[in-house]
Every structure is written in structure tokens, then in C-alpha cells.
Image: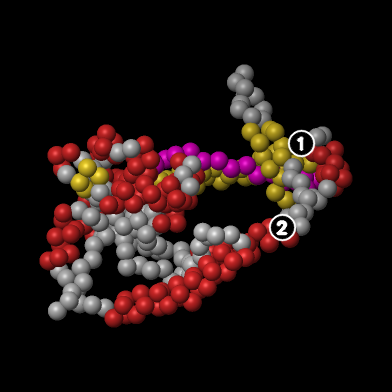
Amino acid sequence: RIKRVFFHEITDEAVEHAFEHPREIDMDLVNAQQARRILDRLVGYNITELLWDRVRNRLSAGRVQSIAVRMVVDREREIEAFNPVEYWSIEANLQKQATNGKEPQPFTAKLAKINGEDFELNSEGEVLPHLDILERSTYIVDSVKRGTRRRRPSAPFTTSTLQQEASRRLGFNAKRTMRAAQQLYEGIDLGEDGTVGLITYMRTDSTNVSDAAVKEAREYIENKYNKDYIPDKPPTYKTKSKGAQEAHEAIRPTKVARHPDAVKEHLNRDQNKLYTLIWERFVASQMANAVYNTLRIEINAGETKADMPYLFRVSGSTIKFLGFL
């Protein structure tokens, strides 16, 4: 009569729901756990003993970290074996001719083609003859193309993307990130509300999100902004890793209404920074795409209008609709 309960977040609602809906024991999961134990003994124990004997004491190795180290070593060897190849590019600082006494804004265009073909310039000697011609050339706009581009929000965090973004934006290493995430998951004392888990389980490679969390996020976005910022259908995201274990949800706040500013006084510095990062990423993931107005200009260049072998391109964009931004 043994049952299994499981939950992705440590909140009153999630724990109560788990015990109200216990599951039967899944022997596939049991066997998977047994396989991990066996691999720990076959791989981890033996390699750890070897490290202590050949390298130094107190080093550890396991079925996961050993493979990760091997991948890092292989990649480092590829980097060391890489032979760099010199290449050059040509850019032109241009400015539209002045009209009505108004000085137009200068811009930079990049050389894209020579005589209608892609090119490679591998030395300064190959570049200088073209510069001599271009410095005395005429530049004429050939085409102007306007359009729109949509930018989709990023998926909610998995363990790896959380570590990457925390490193990029907060300067946290993986250990610091996971320590703060563990604390947010296990629970923070919010005073009158008691101890509450602020995020879902932080060891996951799934981008799935519960229907209840999506509904809560959409309601929050509509109240905070308006319906324009909510996509017609909730976005769905696919994990990039093959064979991802999707038993857990993505990392998200347990309650969207619990804005980072509302819990800031109860969090230490690392917890506050990481919770804000997780909260913003999840809410943004449920919002509408950003829309840009795009502009691409192609410019021909040559010594005469009859002979213009050089094609320069310049492109830019401006925000049309902020969306998740």
C-alpha cells in the first residue's frame, strides 16, 4: 500500500495537492534509480580511488562530472589545435548629401559583394588595391527595403540556462547560483505568510509549465499592461537538449503575483537578484513577441556610374511594439 507523492514546488497548495493525489510506485523510475546507483559504483567509486592514488586526496568523480570533464578536455584540445586564418573586411563611412541646409546623420556600410560575388580578403595586400578604388568612388543607393521582424521571448529557465544567464548578467558562478536557488526552493520566511518556497524545483532540463501557472501569468500581464501584451495562445517551448528529462517543470516563481519588490526585504542579496531574474524570465516568456521595423539599404560603388562592382549593405531596426521587452 505504499504510494508516491511528488511536487515541483514547496508551497501549501502544491504539497496538499500531492498528498491528495498520490501515485502508484512506477517501477521504471525505481529501475532508473537503481541504474544510477550501479553507475556511481562502477564509475564514480573507481575513478575517485584512482584520483586519490594518482593526483591528490579529497578529489571526487562521478557518473556525470567525469563525462563533463572529458567533454571540456576534448573541447580544449580542439581549441589548442585550431589554426587561425587571417581575414579582412571593408567598411565605408557614408553620409547622405545635405538637403535644405540640414546635415544628415553619418552611417557605416559594410562591403558585401564584389562583381556580384562573395569574396575573401586574407591579407592587407589584398585589401589595399580595393581601398584605392573605393576612396575615389561614387556611392549610389540601389535599393531600400523596409519590413518588420518579430522577436520571440526566451523560454523559461532550465538548470543550464539559469546558470548561463546568472553568470552573464549577475556574475554568479554555478555553485553560487545553485546555492541561492536551493534556498529559494526550500523556502523563505515571509513573516505573516510563514515560510514559502518561492521557485519551483531548480534541477530540471524541461521548459514545460503548468496550466495553472500560465493562467496566472496571463492574468497578471493583462492587469499590469493590457490584452495587447498577451499572445492569442500561450507560447510553448521545446527543450534544445536531446533526451531531456521532462518530469519536472521549468524553473519559475511559485506565484507570479509575488513580485520581486514584494519579497525583497525578506531576501539576501543573492536570493533577491536570482529571484528577480527567474521572475522576469518567466513572465516575459508568457508575453507577446516584440515587433521591429526593419530597414536594409544596398549601395553600389565604383569609379563611374557605368562600372560599379562594389555592393555595400547597411541595415537597422527600430521598435514598433515592445511586447515582452
Q: Position of residue 55 (x, y in %)?
A: 61, 62
Checking the image for residue 80, the label placed there is 2
**Is residue 10 rendered to the left or right of residue 53?**
left
Q: Pick out the residue farthest to the left.
A: 20
SS label for mark 1: strand
Relative height, residue 30 to residue 142 (above, below): below
Question: Which residues fall within the magenta stretch?
Answer: 307-325
Name the residue at 49% across, 44% down: 168
Dot 2: element = helix
Q: Position of residue 323 (x, y in %)?
A: 36, 44
Residue located 73% across and 51% down the image = 113
Instruction: Judge left or right: residue 244 versus residue 254.
Output: right
Left or right for 279, reference 83: left
The answer to whether residue 227 of the structure is visible from this angle is no
In screen coordinates, is 219 left or right of 64? left
Residue beneath the point at 36% across and 47% down: 180
Q: Nearer the viewer, mark 2 or mark 1?
A: 2
Task: Give the amino acid at mark 1.
Answer: Thr
Choose the circle earlier in sequence order: 2 or 1: 2
Q: Is residue 17 visible?
A: yes
Residue at numbered disc 1:
138
Q: Quadrant of residue 237?
A: bottom left
Q: Is residue 323 magenta?
A: yes
